[in-house]
Amino acid sequence: MLTKPNPASTTLYCSAEEMESHCVRFIMAEKAIEREVFNLNIEEMPEEILELNPCETLPTLFDRGMVLYDTSVVTEYLDERFPFPPLLPVDPIEKAEKRLLIFRFTRAPGCWYELVKTIEKGSKDEASKARNILKSSLIELIPLFAYKPYFKSDEMTMVDACLAPLLWRLKKLEIDLGAKAKPIHEYANRMFSKESFQESLTDCEKEYN
């Protein structure tokens, strides 16, 4: 078990392998937040933090005496607490659109993040079905990846922070999008080449791609 966190620091407790944790690490690196990051299993989290996270989930953020543990809550808190660079638009309509995309990709029933977990932990048949669905879904959105430098945006947003960890895992998931997905490959390479993305990778994640 880790010791009690430093109340003066921003501390992230996260998984070394899961996409949600990777997403938060990427955001923190992109914003150059001074932080302590611990990659661990939930059982290793300090008792004081675990008691304040009834869901017992990772990632969990400790900051200003608060414990935050839903990924969407954590990411939006970081964007407001550390506003540069902004990863959600100021305009309410544009912000709502980005939030819907994030929900669609990461939390909605049958979302891409859920499909990845099925590929990794489901039966052989479940994994095969999920792999085909995820591949088809990505191919359907090729025009959106080609539309602008980032996903439907001229600047990086939180949507990109959610998509990049998934795309980094495609080789590990045995998903080959083929030559027709050139816009996705180019988008992915732009994201992967960012210093903040490379900084966000754990040792085990570096082996995925």
Image: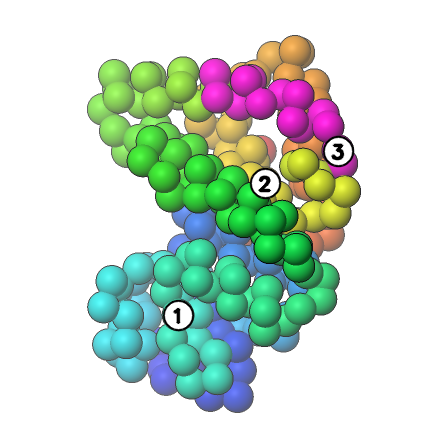
Which of the two labelled residues, at mark 2 and mark 1, occupies the earlier sequence position?
Answer: 1
Write down the residue under mark 1. Answer: 68
- Which residue is drawn at the image coordinates 42% and 57% (left, top)? 71
In the picture provided, is 108 more to the left or to the right than 32?
left
Which of the two labelled residues, at mark 1 and mark 3, occupies the earlier sequence position?
Answer: 1
Q: From this viewpoint, is residue 170 visible?
A: yes
Q: Quadrant of the C terminus?
A: top right
Quick check: marks 2 and 1 in contact, CB under 8 Å?
no
- Choose mark 2 or mark 3, whichever is in front: 3
Q: From this viewpoint, is residue 40 visible?
A: no
What SS does tag 2 mark?
helix
Range of magenta residues? 136-149
Judge whether 77 appears above or below 89 on screen: below
- Which residue is drawn at the image coordinates 44% and 23% (left, top)? 134
Which of the two labelled residues, at mark 2 and mark 3, occupies the earlier sequence position?
Answer: 3
Q: Position of residue 21 (x, y in %)?
A: 46, 54
The numbered dot on residue 152 is none
Instruction: Indicate the amino acid at tag 2.
Output: Ala
In the picture provided, is 85 more to the left or to the right than 120?
right
Write down the residue under mark 2. Answer: 164
Instruction: Indicate the amino acid at tag 3.
Output: Lys
Judge whether 81 appears above or below 79 on screen: below
Write down the residue under mark 3. Answer: 148
